[in-house]
Amino acid sequence: METFIVYLDDKQYALQQLVPMLPVNGTPSVTAKWILIGCPPRLKRHTSRWLTQPAQKKWRQTWTQELTEDVVRLLEASGNEVSVITAHGALVQLTKQIKGEVGHARVVDARRPKLSVNFDPVTEEQPQEKSNWALPGGILAMGAAIVIASE
C-alpha cells in the first residue's frame, strides 16, 4: 500500500492538486493511505494574546477538520484510507516523525502559493523559494510619493 503525506491550507487548491493523482474511472483502483496535514494560518498577535492555549489548539483542529472534510470524502469514496493531522511546529520534523512511523511515503506540498510569503519547507530536500515580491513598506511608500510628485 502506497502512503501519501499531503500538506494543505486551502481546500480548492488542494483538490486541484490531488484529483489528478486519483485513479480514473475504469482503471483498477489501488488503495493508498493518505495522511492529510492541515496547516492553519497563524493567529494574529492580538488574537492569540486573549485566547488560552487549549482554545487555540481547538480552533486549529476545527479549522483543519473544516478544511479537509471534502478532501476526505473524495479520497474515501475511492476506497482509500485517510487520516487527518493538524500541523504544530516545524513541518520538516513532522514529516520525519510520520515517515518514521509509516515507513516510505510520498510527500505532497499542496499549500496554495501566496504573494510575498515564504513557506517553511516540508522536507529537507525541498528547495526553499524566496519571494521576489517582498518589499519593505517604506520603499513602496517612497515609490508612490515619487509617482504622485511627478504628476
Image (spheres, grey):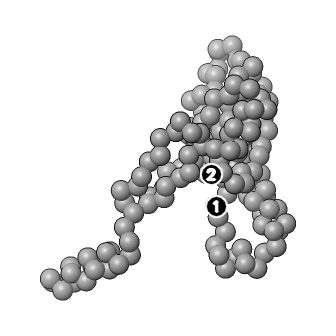
Judging by the rendered image, the residue that carries numbered circle 1 is 41
| Image location (x, y in percent) of residue 89 | 69, 54
Task: Looking at this view, name the residue that lies furthest to the bottom.
Answer: 149
| Image location (x, y in percent) of residue 30 | 71, 18
User: How crowded is the residue under tag 2: few (<14 C-alpha within 10 Å), some, or many (20+)?
Assistant: many
Q: Residue at x 48, y 58 (%)?
A: 117
Q: Residue at x 18, y 86 (%)?
A: 149
| Image location (x, y in percent) of residue 120 | 56, 51
Query: Image quadrant for the C terminus?
Result: bottom left
Depth check: 108 or 16 in front?
Answer: 108
Depth check: 90 or 35 in front?
Answer: 90
Depth check: 2 or 26 in front?
Answer: 2
| Residue 150 occupies quadrant | bottom left
Judging by the rendered image, the residue that carries numbered circle 2 is 9
| Image location (x, y in percent) of residue 126 | 52, 39
Q: Residue at x 26, y 76 (%)?
A: 143
